[in-house]
Amino acid sequence: MRDVFVIACDGTRLMPTSRYRARKMLNAGKAVIHKHQPFTIRLNHASEKNTQPIELCMDTGSEHIGVSVKSEKHEYVHAQYDNLPDEKERYASQKIYRRTRRNRLRYRKARFDNRRKPEGWTAPSIRNKKENHVRLTAMYAEVCPITSVVLEVGQFDPAALQAMEETGEVLQGTDYQRGKRYDLANLREAVFTRDRYTCQVCGKSVKDGVILHAHHIIYRSDGGTDRLNNLLTVCDRCHTPKNHKPGGKLYGLKPVTGTFKDATFMNIVRWHIVDEIKALYPDIEVRHTYGSYTKASRRELGQLAKTHANDAYAMGEFHPKHRHREEHWKKKRRNNRCLAKFYDAKYIDVRNGSKKSGQQLSCNRTKRNIPRNNPQNERVFRGQAVSKGRISIRRKRYDLQPGDIAIWNRKPYSVAGIQNRGAYVKLSNKKVISIKNVHTKYHCHGWRFISDL
């Protein structure tokens, strides 16, 4: 684990110390715990306040953030932080529930001309990721005498990146205006034209009497977009719910080119991050660099592996030989608003006698106008019901949440989950114990520790 940050009795930020010295001071009563994330102690006695220059280097990104806090001789933090991957979908579902709840109260006339977005407005999902960069900087600046901050910013051309990944050619002139959808009526026609109106799974076309669909390779529930490279032409006989599940023909497919959400995110917020940190800490020098300089520095330092934490280490002026182990953290959702969970009924499959859920033995229709008695109907194979479907409702918030630290038998364990309406807790060692036997509890708050890489 990382070194321990130290705060003087008057609040002055001091140089970090080792975990051994921190434990000795805590046991001797010379210090108390100031905060757990990051772990910081506060001295109870007067001490010298000599500090050294410390820089915080951050490899900014949409999904992953690399952080390195280092002085000339020591690296105190070497970590990777992962943002929430489904933030946009959460905001979309929140909007649906809020609108439905408001409509139940009274009728509201539709309004479209009185909505004004303030200057500098960004989408909530983008703003959340941007604020995570600022929060991480503030988290270390509050407990460590940081003198400079270095941020990696970059400008990307998504269209050029996609062309290079697909054809290896550089876009020039009118190539930016005449893309794959040029002179086509809509996106659906562009997908069918590209695939020659043929199912890409079974090879059948309209001449064979099938109906074609535009299938999302990465499902929209998993963050898939409507970009052309994420759509595939499939027929109605292949585009069934069964084929969308594990083991199906459509499950696990990957688009030819990846998504460019990260490049778009950095183009939007790269200077917002720099400006907000400058405004938050006017006494700290804030600089920016680019990925090309980071790549060259990483090679000069001995061909370091391409990780986000190593990119942060390669940035800045200090490159100490005393390295720190890389840590992996993930953003934790503070509140789980899913109060109800549905458990599907179980049936015996009359074909082979196996136990399957009602969803596995469904009518396999994708629209309500399709009759249940269609060629893909598997409800007829439902045998004896093994268990009924039920809904489990969580009626209160539990004291412990997944990712929190619980002390059991004088050893710390990460909480994996809560069972039996909060009466039992499941630990990271897969043991289930009574919550009464947990002596001390530490909440992980915003970030959940995964492992030392």
Image (cartoon, helix red, strand yellow):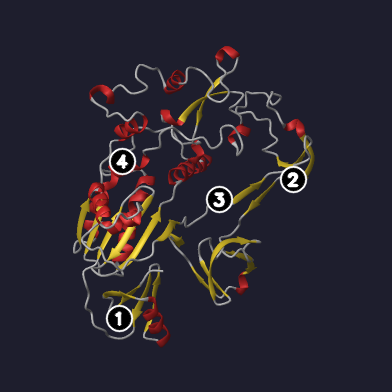
Instruction: Determine which quarter of the picture holds residue 172.
Output: top left
Quickly name the residue at label 4. Answer: 117
* Amino acid type indicated by mark 4: Lys
Identify residue for label 2.
388
Q: Residue at x 33, y 53 (%)?
A: 131
Residue 26 horizontal side relative to residue 369, left or right: left
Q: Which mark is residue 9?
A: 1
**3D distance between C-alphas at marks 4 and 1:** 45 Å
Q: How many numbered callouts?
A: 4
Q: Quadrant of the N terminus?
A: bottom left
Label 3 belongs to which residue?
Answer: 338
> Sequence order check: which comes first, mark 3 or mark 1?
1
Position in image of residue 103 (x %, y %): 50, 39
Q: Which one is earlier in the sequence, the residue at label 4 or at label 2?
A: 4
In terms of image quadrants, where is residue 209?
Answer: top right
Identify the mark nearer the N-term, 2 or 3: 3
Residue 313, image x, y percentages = 29, 59
| Quarter occupied by residue 384 | top right
